[in-house]
Image (spheres, rainbow, N blue to C red):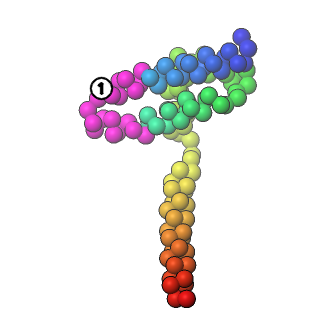
Amino acid sequence: MTNKEMMRQLYERMAAEQQKYKAWLLEQPPNVILDNACKFTVQEDIVMELEVLELTDAQAAALLRSRTPLADVYRAWERAETHHMDDVRDVIEARADTVIRAEKEKGQREER
């Protein structure tokens, strides 16, 4: 099997796995849906990234050996150290700084 075929098969399997999870999730009460919103979103991101990601033959084959490659990748993501909250903090601070600069510039223009 070529790399392209393996990647297509892996994408299709992960997309089907996500569709099954989505169908289950939509049958749940609102509190369960909210409790699983992050998982759903991250899994959507994983599937989306797989569309453009280029894995080696060995990497694609390794993931294809799993019955649930999406769930496996998600569990690994849960255990991984990410910089998500650092990114959130940086965006908050940057937005606040942008507002301060805009207000300062507006005040300077009004003084003229």
**Quadrant of res 49:** top right
Report the magenta residues as a range.
20-38
Residue 84 is at least partly visible in this image:
yes
In percent of the image, x 35 and y 24: which residue is there? 24
In percent of the image, x 71 and y 11: which residue is there? 1
The stretch drawn in magenta includes residue 28:
yes
The stretch drawn in magenta includes residue 108:
no
* Percent of width and height locating residue 44: 50, 33
In percent of the image, x 53 and y 22: which residue is there? 14
* Percent of width and height locating residue 8: 63, 18
In this rendering, position of residue 53 left or right of residue 44: right
- Magenta: main secondary structure: helix
* Percent of width and height locating residue 63: 61, 22
> Which residue is nearer to you in this view: 61 or 53?
53
According to the image, label 1 marks what residue?
27
In percent of the image, x 30 and y 35: which residue is there? 32
